[in-house]
Image (cartoon, grey):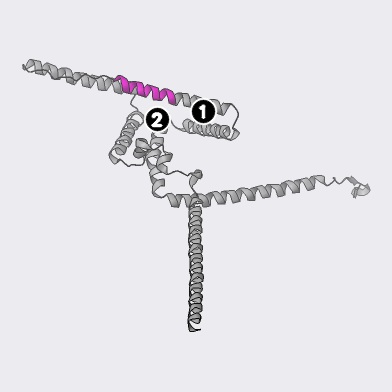
Amino acid sequence: MEEHHKEEEKKEESLIEKIADKVHAHDSSSSSSSSDSDDDKTSSLKKKVYRLFGREKPVHRVLGGGKPADVFLWRDKKVSAGVLGGATAIWVLFDVLEYHLLTLVCHVLIIGLALLFLWSSAMTFINKSPPRIPEVSIPEEPALKFASALRIEINHGFAVLRDIASGRDLKKFLSVIAGLWILSVVGDCSDFLTLLFTTTVLLFTVPLFYEKYEDQVDSFAEKAIAELKKQYAHTLCWDEILSNVVTETSSIPPMLVAIGPLGKTEEI
C-alpha cells in the first residue's frame, strides 16, 4: 500500500511539473509576442515621424549622393570652401566690379603671354635655356564622357517637358508653371549672375543647416503647416457662411413704397 501511495504521489508531482512547464512556456511566448508587438509599435511610430515635403531619404541621398552631395554638405571642407570662394570671387568680379568676361579673358592672356615672352627673351639673352612651356591639350576620353553625360541630361529634360505638356498630370503641370512664374519674377528683380550666386550660397548653407537641425526644423514645419490648414479651413467656413447670408438676403422680395398724399409713405 505504501509503495502504491508513493507512486501516486510521484505521478502527481510529475503532472504538476508538466503543468508548470506549460504555463512558463506560455508566459514566455506571450512576453516575447508582446515585446515583438512593442517593437512593431515603436518602429511604426518611427515611421510616422513627420518629414518636410514627405521626405523618406536622408539629405545626402536627396542631393544625389556621391561627391556633389559631399561638397554641398561640407564633408570635404577644403573642396567646399574652394568652390564657394571661387563662386564669390566670380560674383565680385563680374557683378560688383562690373568686369566683363571677354575683357577678363583678354587681360589674363595678355599678362600671361607677356610674362612668358619676357622670361624666354631674358633666358636667351643671358645664354641660358629658355623655360619649358608645358603642352596643354584636352584629353579625348573625358571630353567625350562629358559630352555624352550632357547629351543624356538634355534629352532627359526634353522628355520631362514633353511629359508635362502631354496633359497626363495636371498637378505636375501647375507646379512647373508656378515654379517658372516665380523664377521669372525673381529673375526680373535681379540679374542672372546674382541669382546664380545666391542659389550657390543657398546650396552650401541650407542643406547643411537642415541636416544639423533636422528634427527641430521638421517639428516647426509640421506645426506651421497644421496652423495654415487650420486657418484655411476657418477661411472656407467664413466664406460659406457669408455666401449663405448673401443667398438668404437676395431671396427676400423688395419692399415697394409709395408716397401718399401729404407726403406720407405707404407700403404696397
Image-based side of 218 in relation to 248, left or right: left
Which disc, if any, is residue 193? 2
Which disc, if any, is residue 160? 1
In the image, residue 109 lies in the stretch drawn in magenta: no
Q: Earlier in the sequence, mark 1 or mark 2?
A: 1
Image-based side of 233 in relation to 79, left or right: right
Image-based side of 128 in relation to 243, left or right: left
Residue extent of the magenta highlight: 129-152
Furthest-bottom residue in this view: 2
Within 10 Å of disc 2 (Cα), the crowding (few <14, some 14-19, many 20+) is: some
Count of labels in the image? 2
Cβ atoms at labels 1 and 2 below 8 Å apart: no
Q: 140 or 117: which is nearer to us?
A: 140
Return the x and y of residue 43 as percentages of the image width and height.
48, 53
Residue at image location 55% in from the left, 27% down from the top: 163
Q: Nearer the viewer, mark 1 or mark 2?
A: 1
Q: Is disc 1 placed on a helix, strand or loop?
A: helix
Q: 155 or 82: which is nearer to us?
A: 155
Furthest-left residue in this view: 127
Residue at image location 50% in from the left, 81% down from the top: 5
Q: Is disc 2 placed on a helix, strand or loop?
A: helix
C-alpha span from label 1 to label 2: 26 Å
Above or below, 132 against 46 in this view is above
